[in-house]
Image: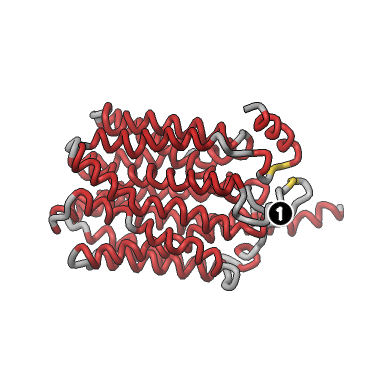
Amino acid sequence: MKNSVSQTPMMSARSGALAMFVILLISYSVNAMDRQIFPLLASDVRREFGFGLADIGLLSTIFTLGMAIAGVPTGMLLARVSRKTVTMIGIAIFSLGTILTATAHGFADMLIYRAATGIGEAMQLTVIIAIGTSYFSRFRSMAVGAVNFSFGVGAIVGPVAGGALLAVRHNWRFPMMVFGLLGFVMIALILFFVRLWFTETRAAEDPRQQIHSVTTLWNRNTMILTLLSLIGGMIIYGYLGMYPVFLREQLGFSGAVTGGVMSAYGLGVFASIAGGWVGDRLPARWVLGGSFLIAALLGYGLFHAATSVFEQSVLSFIWGLVVSGTIYVNLAGYHMRSVSGNLNSSASGLFVSSLYGAAAIAGYSFGWLATHAGWSVAGLTQISLLSCIGALVSQGLQSSKMALPEGRKAALATADAGR
């Protein structure tokens, strides 16, 4: 009887924590809607201002420069300021930058506003990953998967809703204003409903998990994962920044059809929790190596072989499943597991800075390649070739030296030794 009574407060706390985590995940979905809307509207922006492909590619991904700059400093800031406060500040910066983008008069000020949104997103993403991997420390990759799952929700809703709003007003500024204002609604929800006892939880050294106590970020796995994150940033944001432009300008798809294809990508991202589950159970070199090889094949299909709406939708769905749902999730999760629990915030910041640092130039480089060599060459170079390199680099990872439940550590040590 006493045991059942004592379990009641614990179950209540877990339910409350899940509810608060859901609020944070919804706020990140709104963030994803904001982020996805600009590439959809890029062709309209390009027509109005006369920007070149490389210019619009830079505008589509420059927010990642802000993320790269803010990632590590945010990890340091979290040692001094509550995670809840940093989250709300990040959402405010991101949403305000989105609104200001709609008021831009030219390339220079639009570039500044787009970069500023990245600073806000870095703060929000770093904190949510740190909260999820700290409170749910036994399932770190799955917690990251839940964050990316929420991105998938925004990736589906954003393009569809953005296309609908564009059809109503026929003005690219209107959708951006609407999504920017939604961010301030989420700030109010977090302020009143998310509690500090949840957001400020730190990962404990659980005896049921042999947490590998690496007390520095500069270990073998972290260094390899940082290189893989740089490669991942070029691949993921080459696609996200320029794929909608490719669909509209090379294949001639309308804005509404392009939004539908991008929503198929968002559906694939829904596999993020499953991707994290796989990453928590299989050797890292198998998970990332295999996923990068599949991404190489998808790069060929997306930008060279497929021409119909159906083909592009299917390939985009698989891209979301493999690249965002598996590569992105496990790069973040393995960063967390490569160090002891008290370094979670710093590891999260390093992941954000490395992946989004590379992503800052991904749209520009893809646009430059498309302008000078064609879309097929751009896809084969920036996606397929880099993915092959990522698959090769992944073979240096050692899962046995990551944070693992006791029962799986021996099995993965054997897998590492059997290479």
Q: Position of residue 97 (x, y in %)?
A: 33, 66
Does residue 41 appear left or right of residue 150 in this picture?
left
The quadrant of the rendering that contains the C terminus is top right
Q: Position of residue 205 (x, y in %)?
A: 74, 54
Residue 324 point in image, percent of width and height: 44, 42
Residue drawn 46% across and 59% down?
27
Q: Residue furthest bottom?
A: 80
Q: Front-most of 91 and 289?
A: 289
User: 336 or 195: nearer the eye?
Assistant: 336
- Residue 23 visible at all: no
On screen, residue 71 above or below 141: below
Picture quadrant of residue 330: top right
Q: Could you classify mark 1 by the number of other residues whose Cα lies within 10 Å: few (under 14), some (14-19), or many (20 or more)?
A: few
Residue 41: image location, x then y, percent: 23, 52
Residue 277 shown left or right of residue 105 in the figure: right
Q: Is residue 64 visible?
A: yes
Left or right of 94? Residue 416 is right
Residue that appears at 55% across and 48% down: 223
- Tell which of 413 and 19 is nearer to you: 413
Q: Amino acid at mark 1?
A: Met
Q: Quadrant of residue 384?
A: top left
Is the image coloured rainbow, by chain, by secondary structure, or in one colour?
secondary structure
Seen at 61% across and 57% down, the residue is: 344
Q: Which residue is mark 1?
A: 11
Query: Looking at this rendering, what residue extends furthest in the right direction?
Result: 2
Query: Height in image: 288 above or below 193?
Result: above
